[in-house]
Image (cartoon, rainbow, N blue to C red):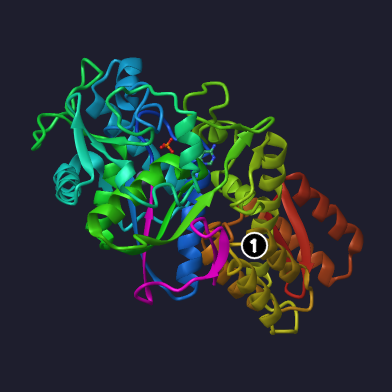
Amino acid sequence: MELFNTLTRKKETFSPINAPNVGLYSCGPTVYHYAHIGNHRQTLFTDLLKRVLTFNNYKVKHVMNITDVGHLTSDADEGEDKMLKGAKREGKTVWEIAEYYTQAFKKDLKNLNVIEPDVWCKATEHIKQQIEMIQKLEKNGFIYEAGGNVYFNTSKCKDYGKLAKLDLNAEQQARIETDPNKKNKHDFVLWFTKSKFQDQEMKWPSPWGQGYPGWHIECSAMSSHYLGEQFDIHTGGRDLMPVHHTNEIAQSESAFNKKPWVKYWMHNEFLVMGKDIKMSKSDNEGFITLDVLQKKGYDPLSYRYLLLGTIYRKPMAFTYEALDAAQNAYNKLKQKVLEMIQSPEEGEDTNAETYIEEFQTSINDDLNTPKALAAVWDMLKNEKLNNNKKYKTLLEFDHVLGLGLAKIDIEELPEEIKTLIEKRDHARLHKDWGESDKLRDEIQAKGYTVKDSKEGTKCTKA
Ligand code: AMP
Ligand code: ZN
């Protein structure tokens, strides 16, 4: 398998630390609002990666965090507290906000047929691990206290910024300082005791005083708690790379003295609206949730199908026209599945090897799903290939695609349609083509497709 590693900016052959086990961590939602379909591009990318790893016989342990404390509206410790912002907007407590939006997020995952992480971890339930990690950093000489807060000193970390390839010299010269307590522009808060926000409800005791953790420390502390001090893959959206992931690496490598902390970093590109505008929770106009799509009549799996048509590393513009096309294609795929179930013996050839090879080569080439989908359709178009073989192969592919194809089954036809089918088959047996055509039109008018097969008339809901 080849995967693009942001750390080296290259496609690399995947080789886990402890094969066949794979440790995978993904930055989950900040639960102060509904997730939008851009966030779900990240969720679905990680789900795809997991499915491809499993298809290749790896045993994946997936950990996803829930950020319910400490994340300010800017990734770099500036702006408002995201959870407080949500609580004020809705007149609820931060705890209520966190619980409500966590459940909403999990519901979306179910609707998108996303395999649940093996471990969900909330930042507020791992305060102890975060404090222990800051203590390790303190022991190793990487922190300082100023203005009541505890900071990570980036100048002590020789390769700070390696993931995003930050040019620190150039940036230091252009520095615009917003926090006078910081010794260096990129220093960040590990623990707040002097909150800028008056009604801060979430507070815990710590060696540095009553307070709460900064945002970045939760991911380092929880991933190492569940996956060990070194693990295989870390994912997230591209926006997290320059600050959040950069800081995760700095604090983890400084605390554990092990490099690299994570072997492969993988980032998805954005879902954009119109001309290159990233869909974002702070932008109310460009904010489309899965719920909105469902209310407009779209199947969440049509959105999943839409994303499969673009490589995860390419920006993708969202339009309803594109979603319509995806929904049509997905419906067509489901229709094909029904036909295969109804006429399993159609087609003589039972060799699907070329398609299996094409599919596997594509997904193993850094998750090239557009090419994998092309292999699927090539297979379905081959009329010589036996339907039963096609169906079984397609269900294998669907372990990766996640389109819920195994759940599709022939629905029980209404009695009225069954009677019309019987009459039509009787007419055809007696070569009464006029009557047969009349009955076909009648069935179609009732919203069913009609197909002739060796066994007689086959109908499905159109
Ligand atoms: P948040 O809930 O804002 O912390 O974001 C959760 C995840 O969604 C992060 O990994 C982000 O990088 C990712 N993300 C946010 N906006 C987009 C977008 N428009 N397209 C793709 N991924 C996104
Ligand atoms: Zn994170």
Query: Residue 179, how many percent across, how many down?
Result: 33, 23
Query: Three-letter amino acid code at disc 1?
Result: Leu
Task: Give the magenta-colored segment's residue range.
Answer: 1-28
Residue at the right extreme of this rendering: 434
Give whichever of 29, 438 is nearer the camera. Answer: 29
Q: Is residue 67 visible?
A: no
- Residue lying at 43% horizontally and 47% vertically, measured from the top left: 161
- Residue lying at 59% horizontally and 74% vertically, measured from the top left: 392
In the visual, does 28 lie left or right of 224?
A: right
Instruction: Give the vertical position of 280 relative to 223 (above or below).
Output: above
Q: Is residue 265 visible?
A: yes
Q: Is residue 18 magenta?
A: yes
In the visual, does 218 lie left or right of 291?
A: left
In the visual, does 53 lie left or right of 148?
A: right
Give whichever of 407, 401 is nearer the camera. Answer: 401
Query: Residue 177, how many percent across, how many down?
Result: 39, 23
Query: Residue 103, how many percent across, how many down?
Result: 33, 38
Q: Quadrant of residue 96?
A: top left
Instruction: Give the vertical position of 25 relative to 387 (above or below).
Output: above
Residue under numbered circle 1: 338
Query: Residue 189, how many percent across, how many down?
Result: 27, 34
Q: Residues within 10 Å of mark 1 (few under 14, many from 20)?
A: many
Give whichever of 135, 392 is nearer the camera. Answer: 135
- Residue lying at 40% horizontally and 33% vertically, measured from the top left: 75
Instruction: Give the vertical position of 55 relative to 246 (above or below).
Output: below
Instruction: Give the vertical position of 263 relative to 209 (above or below).
Output: below
> What element does badge 1 sit on?
helix
Indicate yes or no: mark 1 CB to ligand 1 under 8 Å: no
- Residue lying at 69% horizontally and 75% vertically, measured from the top left: 355
Q: Is residue 426 magenta?
A: no
In the visual, does 372 lie left or right of 236?
A: right
